Image: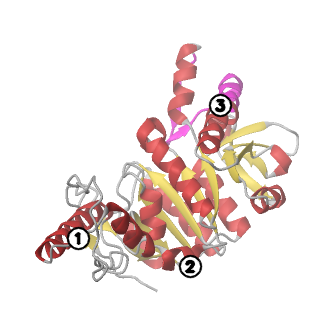
Amino acid sequence: MLAAKALVKPSPIPSASFPSSKTQKSPKSHSTIPNLAFSLRRKNPQTLLAAATNSVQEQQNETSANSVTATPGQLRVDILSESLPFIQKFRGKTIVVKYGGPAMKSESLQASVVNDLVLLSCVGLRPILVHGGGPEINQWLKRLNIEATFLDGLRVTDAATMEIVSMVLAGKVNKNLVSLIDRAGAKAVGLCGADGRLITARPAANAAKLGFVGEVARVDPTILHSIVDGGHIPVIASVAADENGQQYNINADTVAGELAAALGAEKLILLTDVAGILEDREDAGSLVKEIDIKGVKKMMSEGKIAGGMIPKVNCCVRSLAQGVRTASIIDGRVPHSLLLEIMTDEGAGTMITG
């Protein structure tokens, strides 16, 4: 159990420059680059590109002295080989990813997330994507002159708003993600909590004020097993129905956490618009890289975790208590943050352990 917290100051990410032309390689010499994957435990992800760039530069300087220059292909193969231990560790394991925030707004970050999911699937992981779509919902409500109202960070959802939420999440956003994954070379299946009775909803505790905002009453992952076993990536919208068929809008973090628990997932990953859990909320550089349940509960009691981070942390703690091995809150603003979190020791945010 790790109660200690490592604090890391993020560094700016310099641009990398790789060789663009092939150079004849000597049959008596070969290139080596430092082992980036095992250099430090969960180093700040924003330093990874700098580390990679420095390693490449050092390699070029070394080989230049010996009149040998590594080709781009050699560099790619060397770096790819460092991923083997991580591929072996996670191959065949279920990874539940909650997708939202800036990674959903930016086309480049959206492409990064989709490509990461496809790559993970191709190397044998079993990724499951759960998504929200708050900004898109707000846009459609505005078009229809329906005012968006929030209470304690939750969307007040009357009948008219629920109709829009269902149309946007289970329709437009979900099918767009399925299409992007298909175009990237994998096969995706879009569904919402109501499909196959995947999730049975119940009204939230303060439903009188929130309207059709729900909680997860029950999860039946049977339909997901057949989808994943068939080599497809499930893409799940956070809309579900109760026993009577009434639809509810459920927080996507909550849906992801409950699905991860029901599936016995190896890892739950929440993409956010912050670096992770911060020791000092006013200091973006005070990132806590790894912490256990006891540690996060202590931080909450001290008021260091507050606002929108509280439900995310509670979601992670609940999933860990139900058997998920690790849960991570990572920075969705960092390109390829999913690969950084899964394929490196350094990670891309805060990892919470049981």
The residues bearing labels 2 and 3 have C-alpha atoms spaced at a distance of 38 Å
Q: Nearer the viewer, residue 152 or 169?
A: 169
Instruction: Specify whether residue 147 is painted magenta.
Output: yes
| Amino acid carrying mark 2 in the image | Lys
Is residue 87 rendered magenta in the image?
A: no
- Local secondary structure at mark 2: helix
Q: Amino acid at mark 3?
A: Val
The residue positioned 23% from the left and 63% from the top of the image is 53
> 270 or 224: nearer the eye?
224
Q: Which residues are magenta?
A: 146-168
The numbered disc on residue 55 is 1
Q: Nearer the viewer, mark 2 or mark 1?
A: 1
Question: What amino acid is found at the position of numbered circle 1 in the picture?
Answer: Ser
Measured Cα–Cα span from mark 2 to mark 1: 25 Å
Q: Which mark is residue 89?
A: 2
Give how far across and how far down residue 160 sits, in percent: 69, 22
The nearer-to-camera label among 2 and 3 is 2
Task: Say which residue label 3 marks.
Answer: 165
Query: Could you tell me how far apart the alpha carbons at marks 1 and 3 are, in whole angstroms?
Result: 48 Å
